[in-house]
Image (cartoon, rainbow, N blue to C red):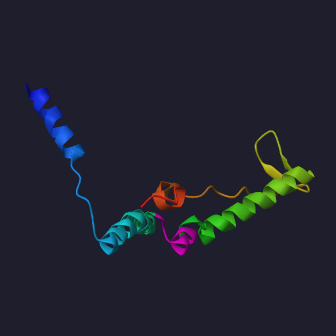
Amino acid sequence: MVFAAMERLKHRIHAFRMPIKDKRVFFLVQCAYFLAPIVIGTAVMRAVVPDPEEMRARINPSAEAAAHTAQQAELFQQALDGRLVVDNRGRLTLDGRQVEAPPPLEPVVYRDPRKVNPFAR
């Protein structure tokens, strides 16, 4: 009984037609149907896509992190060249003299979600 009433209502809704007889109004309706998805899609994309300058600022490392990375890269290159050696006690020696390993970055840097994940807000 209820399903039959729902089917009748559905048939009545989908069978309803209201013809637009005026050619200008029909053209305006066609333009609206064509332009509405474009305008709405553009508005949604502008709201969703982040600003490129903001993303560059989030992705670029801090000066401290960049200096630490450069120091690590220099030590790694020296190890590859065979000049930097780690002895059995874990000490670093560069060309026969002992050098200090750079301290690791503070954990606070890694706990900041903006520095770990540039897309975090």
Point out residue 49 in the picture as x, y percentages from the top left corner. Answer: 48, 65
Residue 50 location in percent, x, y?
Answer: 48, 67
User: Image quadrant for the N terminus?
Assistant: top left
Q: Residue at x 80, y 57 (%)?
A: 75
Give whichever of 57, 69 is nearer the camera: 57
Q: Please indicate whether residue 32 sits to the left or right of residue 10 in the image.
A: right
Residue at the outermost left position: 1
> In the rendering, at what x and y percent does residue 60 appear?
60, 68
Q: Against 9, is 84 above or below?
A: below
Q: Indicate whether residue 51 is drawn in magenta.
A: yes
* Viewer-side residue, 52 vs 30: 30
Residue 114 lies within the magenta run: no
Magenta: main secondary structure equals helix
Please state the extent of the stretch shown in magenta in the rendering. 49-57
Question: Residue at position x 41%, y 61% from top?
Answer: 121
Task: State which quadrant residue 96 falls in.
Answer: bottom right
**Residue 99: quadrant of the picture:** bottom right
**Left or right for 46, reference 23:** right
The number of numbered discs placed on residues in the rendered structure image is: 0
Please give left or right for residue 2 compared with residue 105 in the image. left
- Residue 63 vs 68, above or below: the answer is below
Residue farthest toward the front in the current orientation of the protein:
21
Q: In this view of the protein, which residue sits in the foreground, 90 or 74?
A: 74
